[in-house]
Image: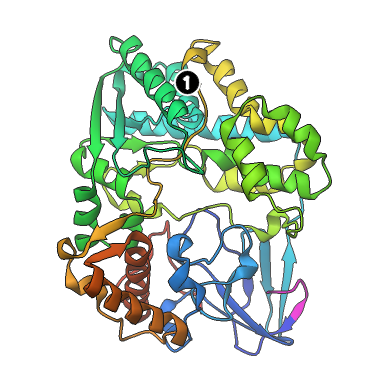
């Protein structure tokens, strides 16, 4: 990990003040240390000779991170780290000082910042576009956006998109409860019916395995892991798109906040009393929470579970109105001691925003927070439908031996079984993305990419 201290600037990093940004994928600073020495770069081509990490083969979903929940798990390159936006590098001729921003704001201050940023973002989008597609999942995140749109009087320029993802499990699994899914589907249908004379229109799509296979054969890693959103954008490209990505974090109902409170000593009995029948929360605490796990403060976390800036390459783009750099910075400063289980479990913070915007109009449609449309589940894909080029071993990266051995094993297994696990496809696409990055043949989407080293 990168310690909070002074390092020797042996690599000749130009003097200046550097920090990663939460909402930027391209241009991320990679850092590596050895004792008091530090190396830094944001140029993938300068990492071409570096050994890939073992875990990026087996855990590719957070690429180029290994885990967004603890940056110390590493990055796609062995011994190199992508430090969170809370870390600041103050570089002089001889010294690189690493420090952490530790300002604090109250929950009320955070709410005002968040609401202002959402409203301002939507105002700009509606001013620039005659049609805005809202990806409406039925979860409370997209209801928050819809309530803001109603507050702005922009329903007539809003086209709702709903979809049925046929790749989602139909049975009761760790993340999917059939009865809750049925209730949410009914609530979505009712909302569309109730607003049909107020909105510009509505489109409903089925997302099928053929959509997933087509993207596996034709697009890069970033677009593939966002298969549901990306497929929808390819079908409707005459307006801006908005959706509830990152709402779990910014609207304060992320299950990892619950872990943080429990690991800091909050009573698990109080937690269970607050569940109030919330299926997902009960599953989380009984199956996933590990009381022996180390508490990881927010300054060691990256706020994005998966980088999604790539969608902005589709004109006029996908807009993340629930998270931007200002919101991310405010969220890092939020005093988590103000959070309670009731706020987290009942999505009270999000509900308050909805009520501020539209009173209780949307209360009948609030069912629960569910699984996002782009969720990837363990399915087997028929090998005959996949492009053989997808499984070519990348030649321009320095492979981890165990990871390379596993890729060769998966190729042999595919030839025997004629099917490929979805995680294997994601892994191959991640490594092939790295192959292009280290050659300089592609870049990761970014607001701006400046190679300062």
Is residue 269 positioned above or below 436 on the image?
above
Is residue 385 positioned above or below 135 on the image?
below
Q: Going by the image, does 271 lie left or right of 189?
A: right
Where is residue 300 shown, x and y percent of the image?
Answer: 68, 60
Q: Going by the image, does 418 lie left or right of 440?
A: left
Q: Nearer the viewer, residue 120 or 349?
A: 349
Give the residue drawn at x 62%, y 65%.
Answer: 71
Residue 268 forms part of the magenta stretch = no
Where is residue 341 shown, x and y percent of the image?
Answer: 73, 33
Where is residue 246 shown, x and y percent of the image?
Answer: 51, 43
Q: Going by the image, does 31 lie left or right of 386?
A: right
Name the residue that disc number 1 marks: 147
Asked if residue 176 shows in the view, the reply is yes
Chosen colour scheme: rainbow
Q: Nearer the viewer, residue 120 or 416?
A: 416
* First to last magenta residue range: 1-6
The kind of secondary structure the magenta stretch mainly shows is loop
Give the residue drawn at x 49%, y 31%.
Answer: 141
Q: Helix or strand or loop: what does disc 1 sit on?
A: helix
Q: Nearer the viewer, residue 253 or 276?
A: 276
Where is residue 183 shown, x and y percent of the image?
Answer: 43, 21
């Amino acid at each position: 990990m990168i310690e909070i201290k002074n390092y020797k600037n042996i690599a000749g990093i130009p003097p200046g003040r550097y920090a990663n940004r939460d909402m930027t994928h391209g241009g991320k600073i990679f850092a590596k240390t050895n004792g008091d020495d530090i190396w830094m770069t944001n140029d993938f081509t300068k990492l071409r000779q570096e050994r890939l990490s073992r875990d990026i083969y087996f855990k590719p979903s957070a690429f180029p991170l290994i885990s967004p929940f603890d940056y110390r798990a590493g990055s796609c390159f062995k011994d190199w780290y992508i430090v969170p936006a809370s870390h600041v590098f103050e570089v002089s001729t001889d010294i690189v000082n690493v420090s952490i921003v530790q300002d604090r704001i109250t929950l009320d201050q955070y709410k005002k910042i968040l609401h202002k940023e959402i409203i301002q973002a939507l105002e700009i989008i509606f001013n620039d576009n005659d049609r805005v597609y809202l990806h409406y999942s039925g979860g409370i995140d997209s209801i928050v956006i819809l309530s803001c749109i109603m507050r702005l009087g922009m329903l007539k320029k809003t086209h709702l998109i709903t979809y049925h993802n046929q790749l989602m499990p139909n049975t009761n699994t760790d993340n999917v409860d059939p009865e809750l899914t049925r209730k949410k589907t009914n609530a979505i249908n009712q909302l569309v019916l109730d607003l049909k004379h107020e909105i510009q229109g509505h489109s409903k799509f089925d997302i099928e395995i053929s959509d997933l296979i087509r993207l596996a054969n034709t697009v890069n890693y970033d677009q593939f892991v966002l298969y549901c959103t990306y497929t929808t954008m390819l079908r409707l490209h005459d307006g801006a798109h908005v959706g509830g990505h990152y709402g779990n974090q910014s609207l304060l109902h992320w299950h990892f906040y619950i872990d943080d409170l429990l690991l800091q000593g909050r009573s698990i009995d109080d937690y269970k009393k607050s569940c109030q029948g919330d299926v997902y929360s009960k599953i989380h605490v009984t199956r996933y929470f590990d009381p022996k796990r180390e508490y990881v403060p927010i300054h060691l976390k990256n706020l994005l579970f998966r980088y999604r800036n790539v969608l902005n390459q589709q004109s006029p783009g996908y807009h993340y109105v629930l998270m931007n750099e200002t919101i991310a910075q405010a969220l890092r400063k939020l005093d988590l001691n103000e959070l309670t289980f009731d706020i987290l479990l009942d999505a009270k913070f999000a509900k308050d925003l909805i009520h501020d915007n539209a009173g209780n109009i949307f209360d009948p449609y609030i069912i629960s927070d569910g699984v996002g449309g782009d969720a990837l589940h363990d399915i087997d894909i028929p090998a005959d439908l996949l492009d053989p080029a997808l499984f070519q071993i990348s030649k321009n990266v320095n492979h981890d031996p165990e990871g390379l051995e596993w890729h060769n094993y998966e190729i042999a297994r595919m030839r025997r079984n004629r099917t490929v696990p979805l995680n294997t496809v994601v892994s191959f696409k991640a490594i092939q993305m790295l192959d292009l990055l280290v050659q300089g043949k592609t870049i990761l989407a970014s607001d701006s990419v400046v190679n300062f080293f």
